[in-house]
Amino acid sequence: MADIAIRDALRQALEEEMNRDERVFIMGEEVGEYNGAYKVTRGLLDTFGPRRVLDTPIAELGFTGLGVGAAIAGLRPVVEWMTFNFALLALDQVINNAAKMRHMSGGQLSCPIVFRGPNGPAEFLSSQHSQALQSLLVHVPGLKVVAPATPYDAKGLLKSAIRDDNPVVMLESEMAYAWTGDVPEGEYLVPIGKADVKREGKDVTLIVHSKPLRLALEAAEQLAAMDIDAEVVDLRSLRPLDEETIYRSVRKTNRAVVIDEAWPMASVGSHVAWLISHNCFDELDAQVELVCSEDVPMPYNHTLELAVQPSVEKVIRAVRKVCYTE
Amino acid sequence: MAGTKAKQYDKTFLLDLLTDMLKIRRFEEKAAQMYGLKKIGGFCHLYNGQEAVAVGSVAAVDLKRDHVLTSYRDHGHALAVGMDPNVVMAELFGKLTGCSRGKGGSMHLFDVERNFLGGNGIVGAQIPIATGVAFASKYRGTGGVALCFFGDGAIHQGAFHESLNLAAVWGLPVIYLVENNHFGMGTAVKRVSSVEDFSVKAAGYDIPGRAVNGMDVLTVYEELSEVVEQARTDSRPCLLDVKTYRYKGHSMSDPAKYRTRQELEKYKEQDPILLLKARMLENGHLTEQEFKKLDDEMKHVAQAAVEFAEQSAEPPLESIYEDVYT
Amino acid sequence: MAERILMTALSPTMEEGSIVSWKKSEGDAVASGDILCEVETDKATMDYESTQEGVLLRIVLPEGRSATVGQTIGIIGDQGEDVNGLLAEVEAEGERVAPGADTGETSVSAGHEAPTPAARSAEADSGGRAESGAAHIIKASPLARKLAQQKNIDLASIKGSGPDGRIVKRDVEQFSPGPATAAPTAVAGPAGQDRTIAVSGRRAVIARRLSQSKFEAPHYYVRDSVNVEAVIAARSMLNKQLPQKVGFNAFIIKFVAEALKRHPGINASWQENTIVQFGRIDIGLAVDAGNGLITPIVRNCGNRGVVDIDAELKRLIDKAQLNALTPEEYTGATFTISNLGSFGVEEFTAIINPPGAAILAVGETRPTPVADHNGELAVRPVMKITLSSDHRVIDGAAAAGFMHELKLMMENPARVLY
């Protein structure tokens, strides 16, 4: 076991997969000579050279589409978007091509490509650079979407994503790249489509993905002091979604609080809340609560930007509501 | 003059070109008829008039290592690469025997065996993809070239600029071929373009650019043979502005009121099929009887394709969830 | 802070209640748990225990008047508080306001203006209606509903601890049925002729529940004649030994309970996606309580003897005559018997009383010529019984099997021992 940061876990995954499979290459803005805007690709240019680590012009649509073309022609590109905010320029290639190539060709083509980069609120970045956009991507059949929040999951999921024959979008988090955790020596994979119970409990289920996992675990600790035993389910994969793990937990606790740092409408959180109320209706002892970002663009002011996002306090309040201890 | 040019080629080669063009013409006429009978629905963009572009270009590439990508006006290219007219017509009918199992329709014809990668419904979206296909060929050292067709409407998309810049910077073997039929849907080129000769845009990327007469299949073949060989040798992209004309509206729902009958008749005087036929008659490669016989055969091929499509099964409902993920 | 006293549901099916008498007068101090008034519900006259504290400032709903659940019946607050604002709101919602009793403590202020029509309609459009509508619903979490159903607990008898009194899991788990407390009060019925009779709460519930049963449950009927000679003999033998005579109905209940034990499929209920076969045999007996039908329930008949059953029946019928049955005493019968024999009826069919899936209609015992097994005619006491069954739960063969068992048992009571 080694205690390493998420960015290093991601780099290990890239390095191992590039060593394992010659078809894997990485491209994006500043991934090479600059060593990555968030240092995920540090050293890879030195190791693998410019043939397999490519600095692109600032042309998200162009290089994303180029990746799609390379994928259908037999390579396994890893496309790094400097942030998902800029990926909006590339969504036509993701949604209309990567996700649909297999379908439109009646199964003739496959598109093994990974799109990855930081998503979600950061700090002091205002509206265009600090937003959680997973709702746009999980909406699309043909894509897989993963959202790890620990070094172990980040490494294992990225390796699985690179080996997957479908397009996989990997949501990372600028604020979480430095988070550390244990990663075993040697080869392992985390399967796409499996949630993970990060903390067992019996009174309420917290369902979370990506960066807010930390605040969910912190809330669970504080709730324990209030005699509320919270279970924390980390979705890890958003598409496909591990519904069974969600239901198993909610059927045990009879209460659910869903946490999602995206906006409330048509989000992973609202969808999961619907799934629970639909599939666990008779097992629910309270309404399902959703703790999400306020329905506004991100403000620059720090107090305001914190107030907009999910917090430990908001999670605790929601839990107390569903436990009727408010 | 015309006669001397055709003399350089043997009869079989010329007959193949003529056969392919006639096949496309008769197929498209049948498709129009079937559309009128509601056997084919949705968007259906016909290729009548432009046959020399697809047939002349495809004759100049090696489909064992080169790839062809095009837009939604793709019936002609599909037939030019050698796809079975039955399979193409069945796809237009939405039948299980279609090349995309009825999932793609008119705009999404694919044949992986023949390196024909679609069939893209978003204007210009195939340009980055073709660039990526060329990237893969170069990465793997196959010596393959990507032949990318798109219309004069697509040239104004950002994807065009981003792709040509990337291909130039990374030295990718792509032939960017504008099928300039003078109208982006109902809008004349001169109303929306800063230049009328698109080949001059090549200078902006420091790559070769040429203007080509797209009504003459031999000219197209010769020009393409040169640039394909050059791209293969130098691993560099080029841009061709191939002037052509479509006899039908943009799609089956377009009555083409934005141009005059006289203009259409003027172009029909240079009809690519009649042009090649005249040369072959002049050079003794063809008799009127032979032409008549060939034309009848192609009419029969089109009719047989309709019969095949008619008799083919609808895709079963269970296939809805197939071809989405591998 | 003056607040409204609202009509609340005092029985599970109550939607409306009328004030029989106010037990507090305007100006009286009210503590939580004090009896404010008596309310005639659809089934019984119930005490309205206050959940609020303060001084009864105003009686809004006078005696003899009725209100739907959620409507304002009075105002409670601090001594001397001005209630005119609240009264105006209540009035704007279209509720009746009783003329204020002269307590010397409340008075209409001179400057008070009646709300304008616009204000009235605006008030009416806002929360008031929705609130009174929502009050009809017993709030309970889906899990609590399911648990209560499994435990056969009436949700209305549980006090919810969740927001707005929502019944949640812990409330059902902690619930234990306590002794019922209700002050019986007889209500005199009006008399006269050519009358238009207002539909009482109880009558409305009878109408609704029975219509629903008849419309939703596909009824069919199985009829038989029973020679009750042996039952009469058994009864007279027993009664010779007892100071208190055991009624014939207790015998019918006992035999029905024994037959149900052997045919549990009849002691069942349609629950949309499931059929519940009840573990207990709780038999309701339709009783005419003077102003409407009520079915007091003898619980757990399968394990009781006729003497015990008879004592319980007498106690319940006495209470029913006084309108004093508590909801636990008349809801949830797993099987029902209706006996119109005492009215001289030979035979009839009855409508199933949910949640049960069958009801037995019993006619008068009459001397009837019967052919014995030698084919010779003899006059015997014969009673006609008709079983109405819900075909969703009980098929014809099952109903016939039950009826046959019941007949054999009553004609040969020793069969109970089999």
Image (cartoon, coloured by chain):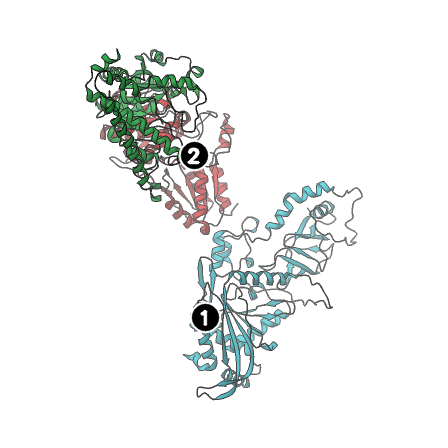
Chain colours: A red, B green, C cyan
Quickly name the residue at label 1.
C399
Mark 2 and 1 residues: CB-CB less than 8 Å, in contact?
no
Chain bearing mark 1? C
- Looking at the rendered structure, the secondary structure element under dot 1 is helix
In percent of the image, x 44 and y 39: which residue is there?
A269
Circle 1 crowding by C-alpha within 10 Å: few under 14, some 14–19, many from 20:
many
- When the figure is inspected, residue B85 is found, relative to residue C111, above or below; the finding is above
| Viewer can see residue A166 | no
Task: Pinpoint residue B30: horizontal percent, then vertical percent.
Answer: 34, 31
Task: Pinpoint residue C230: horizontal percent, then vertical percent.
Answer: 49, 84
Quickly name the residue at label 2.
A135
Under mark 2, the amino acid is Ser
Separation (CA) of disc 2 from disc 1: 58 Å
**Quadrant of the rendering where the C terminus of chain B is positioned:** top left
Question: B109 or A290: which is nearer to us?
Answer: B109
Under mark 1, the amino acid is Ala
- Looking at the rendered structure, the secondary structure element under dot 2 is helix
Relative placement, left or right, of A130 versus B128 is right
Q: Which of pointers 2 and 1 indicates the residue nearer the eye? A: 1
| Viewer can see residue C228 | yes
Task: Pinpoint residue C235: horizontal percent, then vertical percent.
Answer: 53, 83
Residue A156, numbered circle:
none
Task: Pinpoint residue C261: horizontal percent, then vertical percent.
Answer: 44, 72
